[in-house]
Image: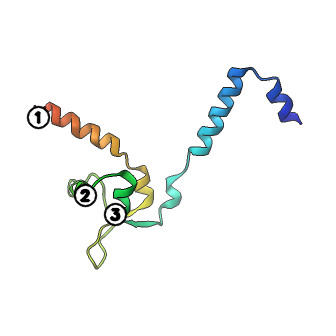
Amino acid sequence: MNDATLLHNMEPDDLEKMFEAKAEKMIRYNPEKFYSVIIPASWVCHIHQISKATLQRWVEQDIIIPEPREKDGNLNFRLSEVLKFNVDAIKRKRNKQFIMNGHV
C-alpha cells in the first residue's frame, strides 16, 4: 500500500524518471557472468552482424583476441569478451582512418 501511495503522490516527471531508472536497471547486465562460456567464431559474427572475413581480419589485427585455438584450428571466443566488444566503435575508427587517408 505504501508504494501505491508514493506513486499516487508523484509528479509526472518524477514518475517518468523512476520508470527510466527501473528500465535501465533491467537492461543492464554483467557480461562477466558469461566468462566461462566459449563460443565459436560463427556466433561472434552472428551477434555482431559481421562477416567471417571481417572477424578474421580483426583477429589478425589484434582488435579482438580469440581463445587459444582448438586442435581442429577453429577460432573460439569468450562470450563475456564478445558481449563487451564494441563493433560500432571499431567501424567508426576504421571509417575515420579511411577518410583521413583520402579514400573518399
- Asked if residue 38 is positioned above or below residue 100 in the image, the reply reads below
- Residue 42 is marked as 3
Label 1, label 3: how far apart the Cα atoms are: 30 Å
Q: In the depicted view, which residue is nearer to us: 70 or 44?
A: 44
Q: Which residue is identified by label 2? A: 59
Q: At numbered mark 3, what does the secondary structure look like: helix, strand or loop?
A: helix
The disc, 1 or 3, on the residue closer to the chain's N-terminal end is 3
- For marks 2 and 3, give the CA distance: 13 Å
Residue at position x 50%, y 56% from top? 32
Task: Estimate the spatial distance between the alpha carbons at disc 1 and disc 2, rounded to whole Å.
Answer: 24 Å
Residue 18 figure quarter: top right
Amino acid marked by disc 3: Ser
94 over 40 or under it: above or below? above
Residue 79 - label: none
Q: Residue at x 30, y 54 (%)?
A: 64
- What residue is shown with label 1? 103
Q: Nearer the viewer, mark 2 or mark 3?
A: 3
The disc labelled 1 sits on which kind of residue? His
Of the residues tagged 1 and 2, which is closer to the observer?
1
User: Residue 60's x, y, as percent?
Assistant: 20, 58
Tag 2: Cα neighbours inside 10 Å, few (<14), some, or many (≥20)? some
Relative to 75, 11 lies left or right:
right
Image position of 9 (left or right of 85): right
